[in-house]
Image (cartoon, rainbow, N blue to C red):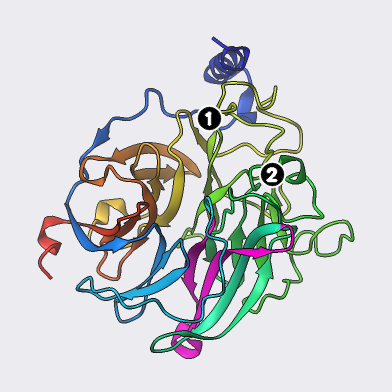
């Protein structure tokens, strides 16, 4: 056993005995829960999508769907795909980069604004950016880029990129460490490895935690993140929750708080893909512990709190897409902790890139593949619409 694994075993034993008090995160479930068939019926709504990354429901029940190579389509309730909408800027469609998340303005009924994140090419390489445009018949109109990650770097990995509107109308944007830029994650002059918060027009909220610090970017909300590809707002509390990729081990569930440091890469429960240690510590003063963590990883992407009527027993549960091994993960929360985890594989044993709740209360997922699909999970009685 490696020294990192041995140290982890000692730490978990101490945690179980209570010797370490409350400073450690909740341990991951042990053993890993078995993958079971999801309760209900899984149907394919649409297929033939190239690496779809996100979907968002329009008020009329149609879906906006992003494809990583740079296409935005509308998919109707019968599964018919539109031609790509015009207006999307050029994207850096390499590695994990491309057209990524999609979100409607909280005032979409009045302003028809659609927000999207993407890997933007430019001087130095590429960086995560956020644009918005007004949804027209065949295009996004009056498109403008309202925020850019700095600096752009020569890497095709770890763009983060989930978009989540808070109750007050501000927009959270999750970032990654760009894989090659770990030293910048703890630096406040850059937005590498951060969660940022902006107003809907791209300006900076006056109550952001670092807005008055000259040595920090004013849009930073929290820092010390590796690669956050899942984010959701708890509809009961308004709290932001994120799920981020670890390395080999160390995927984390967090609820990022203003100004807090979540430790990457100085503390982690993971190791390098080679098995070499990343850090000699799992805790440090002034750094937050995850609410929950995974080893082996689930490779999280996409998340939603369930609030529908189709599965009443699931209300308040957090659903997370798993890219590896590929499944839909259900987390029951209680008192801010995970009290139960279930993994739905079987008919959902795919690379789940995003998960959303539909207006019918069913769960909709996109699969990360050259021949990606939109899947729908609904109770048997809800399959005949």
Q: Which residues are magenta?
A: 97-124
Q: Confirm whether the magenta stretch covers residue 98.
A: yes
Determine the residue positioned at 52% across, 59% down. 93
Query: Which is nearer the eye, 72 or 192?
Result: 72
Q: Which mark is residue 158?
A: none
Q: Element at badge 2?
A: loop
Query: Which is nearer the eye, 89 or 53?
Result: 89
The residue tagged 2 is 224
Choose top left, top right, bottom left or bottom right for residue 19: top right
Q: How far across and how far down the image is residue 360, in percent?
A: 25, 69
> Label 1 vs label 2: CA separation?
17 Å
Whether residue 71 is situated above or below residue 344 in the rendered picture:
below
Q: How far across and how far down the image is residue 324, in percent?
A: 40, 38
Q: Is residue 209 left or right of residue 341?
A: right
Quarter of the picture containing the N terminus is top right
Whether residue 255 is situated above or below residue 123 in the rendered picture:
above
Q: How far across and how far down the image is residue 280, in percent?
A: 70, 22
Determine the residue positioned at 76% across, 38% down. 286
Whether residue 13 is situated above or below residue 228 in the rendered picture:
above
Whether residue 180 is situated above or below residue 199 in the rendered picture:
above
Q: Is residue 224 left or right of residue 10?
A: right
The residue tagged 1 is 248
Query: Which is nearer the eye, 234 or 8?
Result: 8
Q: Confirm whether the magenta stretch covers residue 1.
A: no
**Sequence-wise, which precedes: disc 1 or disc 2?**
2
Quarter of the picture containing the C terminus is bottom left
């Amino acid at each position: 056993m490696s020294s990192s694994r041995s140290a982890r075993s000692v730490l978990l034993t101490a945690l179980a005995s209570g010797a370490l008090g409350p400073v450690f995160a909740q341990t991951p479930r042990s053993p890993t829960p078995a993958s079971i068939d999801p309760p209900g019926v899984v149907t394919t709504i649409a297929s033939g999508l190239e690496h779809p990354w996100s979907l968002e429901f329009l008020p009329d029940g149609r879906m906006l769907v992003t494809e990583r190579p740079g296409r935005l389509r509308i998919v109707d309730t019968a599964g018919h795909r539109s031609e790509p909408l015009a207006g999307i800027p050029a994207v850096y469609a390499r590695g994990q980069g491309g057209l990524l998340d999609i979100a409607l303005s909280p005032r979409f009924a009045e302003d028809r604004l659609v927000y999207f994140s993407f890997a933007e090419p430019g001087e130095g390489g590429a960086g995560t950016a956020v644009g918005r445009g007004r949804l027209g018949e065949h295009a996004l109109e009056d498109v403008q880029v309202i925020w850019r990650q700095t600096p752009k770097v020569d890497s095709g990995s770890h763009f983060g990129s989930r978009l989540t509107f808070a109750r007050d109308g501000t927009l959270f944007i999750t970032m990654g460490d760009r894989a090659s830029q770990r030293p910048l994650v703890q630096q406040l002059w850059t937005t590498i490895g951060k969660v940022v918060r902006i107003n809907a027009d791209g300006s900076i909220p006056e109550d952001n935690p670092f807005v008055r610090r000259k040595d920090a970017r004013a849009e930073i909300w929290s820092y010390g993140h590796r690669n956050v590809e899942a984010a959701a707002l708890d509809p009961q509390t308004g709290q932001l929750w994120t799920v981020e990729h670890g390395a080999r081990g160390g995927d984390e569930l967090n609820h990022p708080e203003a100004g807090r440091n979540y430790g990457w890469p100085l503390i982690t429960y993971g190791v390098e893909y080679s098995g070499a240690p990343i850090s000699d510590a799992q805790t440090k003063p002034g750094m937050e512990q995850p609410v929950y963590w995974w080893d082996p990883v689930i490779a999280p992407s996409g998340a939603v709190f369930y609030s529908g009527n189709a599965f009443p027993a699931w209300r308040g549960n957090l659903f997370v897409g798993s890219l590896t091994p590929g499944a839909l993960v259900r987390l029951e929360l209680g008192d801010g902790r995970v009290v139960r985890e279930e993994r739905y594989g079987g008919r959902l044993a795919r690379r789940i890139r995003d998960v959303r709740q539909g207006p019918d209360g069913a769960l909709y997922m996109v699969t990360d593949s050259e021949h990606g699909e939109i899947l729908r999970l609904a109770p048997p009685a809800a399959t005949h619409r």
